[in-house]
Amino acid sequence: MSETALAALLRAIRQRASEAGAPWGSRAYLSPAPQGTAYPYLVFQKQAGGEINGVRARDAEFVMLVKAIDDSLAGALAAATVISERFNDAGVYDRPAGPLDGGADWVIQTTTEEQNVFYSERLDGRLVYHSGAQYRVRMEAV
Amino acid sequence: MPTYNGNNAYLAIDGVDVSGFYQTFTPSRSMDGIDITAGAGKDHRQRAEGLADGSCSGTVVYDTAAVNTYMAALDVGEHTVTYGPEGNAPGKPKHQQKYIFTSIDGPTVDIEKSKVVFDFSGDAADAPINNILAGAVF
């Protein structure tokens, strides 16, 4: 096995987030985004999880946060819709055509959207909106 | 040696190795005590050994790549189960017995995407072929 489950998942999320047509363009980062990144942009990070020991094979479950940050409320909410379309029910058992790619070592079995994420903050004198969701991801080693 | 806390068990049903797909397996043994209390003035029950009996229960996951290789071995009916809690290396404890699988539940799918499994249980069809409690090994 050449990579951990988390490594495979981070790469799969980055890959899906970078597909053409997203409001954030190529601005998708493992949190935090670089200083001065233009709005909107997307960040993702692990919230919880690890090996679940449900079977003899290596298996893992993570809760991942995926959210867009924008200085437009409408923009942030629209970006959250795209996030949901790309990451909810995106495992091989949810979406046989075009699932998240776990690479050579891992299968991303299911992804399930759970907690909605939305809040605003005042940054450099203007309102900035965070909008997205937490996703529960189950994986198993090939 | 320390207490065993492992999951490297060997489990085969009718010769089909399901070691990679089990979640639990328990073989059980039982025996009724036959009341033989006799004679006047007894103040304590007396018993003798009755017939031995056995049962088993287990859970096997639904592996989409391999399920067709072992699903038939889980159906109701007579099956030979071979079990080694420490694996099947030579010298490791072994239990082998014919069971009548009297029930099989699953595969159950639920909306919360829980792991899909088969739950089975059975009654012994005969005395053990290899009795782990009598010291049988692979």
Image (tube, rainbow, N blue to C red):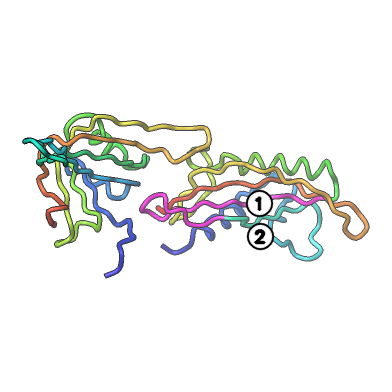
- The residue pinned by badge 1 equals A65
Label 2: chain letter: A
Is A69 one of the magenta-colored residues? Answer: yes
Question: Disc 2 marks which amino acid?
Answer: Leu
Is B53 one of the magenta-colored residues? Answer: no
Please check whether the numbered discs 1 and 2 fall on a single chain.
Answer: yes
Which residues make up the magenta segment? A49-70
- The residue pinned by badge 2 equals A30
Q: Nearer the viewer, residue B113 or A13?
A: B113
For label 1, the SS is strand
Image quadrant in which the C terminus of chain B is located: bottom left
Instruction: Determine whether, in the image, residue B132 is placed left or right of residue A97.
Output: left
Q: Position of residue B83 (x, y in %)?
A: 21, 49
Asked whether the beta carbons under mark 1 and mark 2 sit within 8 Å of each other, the answer is no
Instruction: Determine whether, in the image, residue B55 is placed left or right of residue B22.
Output: left
Question: Disc 1 marks which amino acid?
Answer: Leu
Q: Where is residue B7 in the image (x, y as percent from the top left)?
A: 32, 56
Residue A77, picture quadrant = top right
Label 1: chain letter: A
Instruction: Determine whether, in the image, residue B56 is placed left or right of residue B65.
Output: left
Mark carried by residue A106? none
Residue at the spot x=38%, y=38% of the render?
B117
